[in-house]
Image: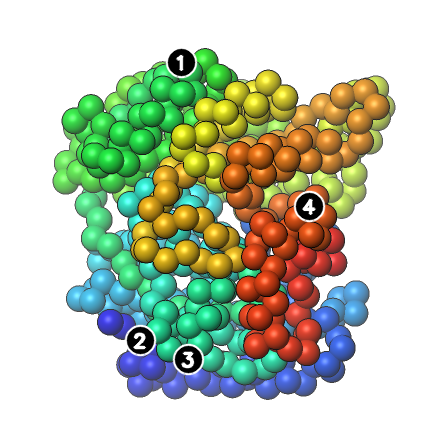
Amino acid sequence: MTRISSLPPPKLAAHEAAVARLRDSYAAVPPHQPVRLAKPTSNLFRFREIDSAGKAGKRAGAHAKGTRAGGVRYLDVSAFGHVIHVDPRAKAAVVGGMTTYEDLCDATLPYGLMPLVVPQLKTITLGGAVTGLGIESTSLRNGMPHESVTEMQILTGDGRVVVATKDNEHSDLYYGFPNSYGTLGYSLALAIELEQVKPYVHLRHFAFNDPESCMSAIAEIAASGEYKGHKADFVDGTAFSGQELYLTVGAYSDKAPWLSDYTGQQVFYQSQRKTREDFLTIRDYIWRWDTDWFWCSRPFGVQHKLIRPFWPRRYRRSDVYRKLVAFDRKHGLTDVLYDRRGVAPREDVIQDVEIEVGRGHEFLDFFFRRVGMSPVWMCPLRLRGGKSWPLYPLKPGELYVNFGFWGTVALPPGKSDGYHNRLIEEEVSALGGHKSLYSTSFYDEEEFRARYNGQAYDRLKAAYDGGGRLLGLYDKCVRGR
């Protein structure tokens, strides 16, 4: 097993020096001054918090050692934004916690390897996917990204640097770090497993005309590892309505009789309605959703046949669209436009939820009836190991489906912002599901603690951030402080 401490000596020395600098910078921050990481990118949707961090991240990228903004001290973590070491023989890597999956895959694919789960967007960081949870079409086989982490080196809230594994003295932090959203500490380096890949992925799109048969097919794939004779190395899907759903089942392939390109004029999610079979290179498959931010590039006109040829390919990326949304939020451009046109107010509905497969059809029936947003992403997952992770307590062995939906919905007359989001949270709770916390949440504190194991969180907070240097989980994810 590749360990952080067994890095080649020059790499270990450089990393330890960076750790010492960051630890000293953290120790120099007055105890009552809020601390954040200066990151140039983010995939969260709590805009007030992350846009100020993005500005600090740009300054940190210009070699700032510590940046203040609005009374918050932003720590320069740029030294932890790269792949430290790849060990192709062990199928493992040691990676800085701020490394994007784009850079990580660029480092591993030349060896014919990739992380066991690669979240859909290029600028998601490895540390972010671990502390905030991640998912993708290998999650039916490989669970979530944190399950393939063998070691986590963490700067804790109380200023220590510890290495947590599943069986050492910090195993409580190892299991409690996922879904803690940087409120217990920050990952500096992670040792991860990798898996062998083939050059191509052979896709087949299977159509369904009702949610129940689609959920049954997911259960069948989970049991057999294939569907209609097609091996299921990758599985996800798209629901355009309650009568039009597709599962995309991908199999590794050594050969490809043709190749599609969804970084150019064609749009991946639209292909599911037009074709039944496809081939992509492994790299293009990994980033098939990033080019158009799933379908969320539509408001910018990028998918329009008259605009797309003139939108530079290098700007067809999720982080570019995210910056455009942040600019719009900052200046209120869309709100002014809607107001002038007399358009009804719209509510952002941006969530990922996990529902047990047997109740997945109930969620989709509710969603299309009460919310009406389309499309909806579907991604089956099952924990890889036999142990639950306390702050996001999915059941080991249970098959879930992640439903992701990202956009805006018109508010009914007399309803205020949060109406649809609260409806969804209530339905998810009624179905025994879970909601990811990367976007705005509305739970009251009692329910939040019940759903996300507040007692276990309190023990971890006392053990690793007893002085409360970092925000608490409820404050960060619900109150948005």
- CA separation in Å, label 1 and label 2: 49 Å
Tell me which label, 1 or 2, sits earlier in the chain: 2
Residue at image coords 80%, 31%: 416
Cα distance between the residues tagged 3 and 1: 51 Å
Residue 458 visible in image: yes
**Viewer-proximal residue among 370 and 281:** 370
Q: Quadrant of the N terminus?
A: bottom left
Report the Cα–Cα distance between label 2 and label 4. 39 Å
The location of residue 29, given as percent across then percent down, is: 70, 81
Q: Which of marks 1 and 4 is nearer the N terminus?
A: 1
Identity of the residue drawn at 49% across and 74% down: 154
Distance from disc 1 to disc 4, alpha carbons, whole Å, reads 34 Å
Earlier in the chain: of badge 3 and badge 2, it is: 2
Marks 2 and 4, the one that precedes in the sequence: 2
Which image quadrant is residue 230 in?
top left
Mark seen at residue 357: none
The single residue placed furthest to the left in the displayed view is 254
Residue 443 disc label: 4
> In the depicted view, which residue is nearer to us: 446 or 476?
446
Which amino acid type corresponds to the residue marked 1 in the rendered image?
Answer: Asn
SS class of the residue under badge 4?
A: loop
Question: Residue 169 got which mark?
Answer: 3
Q: Which amino acid does label 3 sit on?
A: Glu
Position of residue 186 relative to residue 422, above or below, is below
Vertical side of 376 occupied by 134: above or below: below
Q: Nearer the viewer, mark 1 or mark 4?
A: 4
Mark 3 lies on a secondary structure that is loop
Residue wearing tag 1: 209
Gap in Å between the C-alphas at discs 3 and 2? 16 Å
Disc 2 target residue = 3
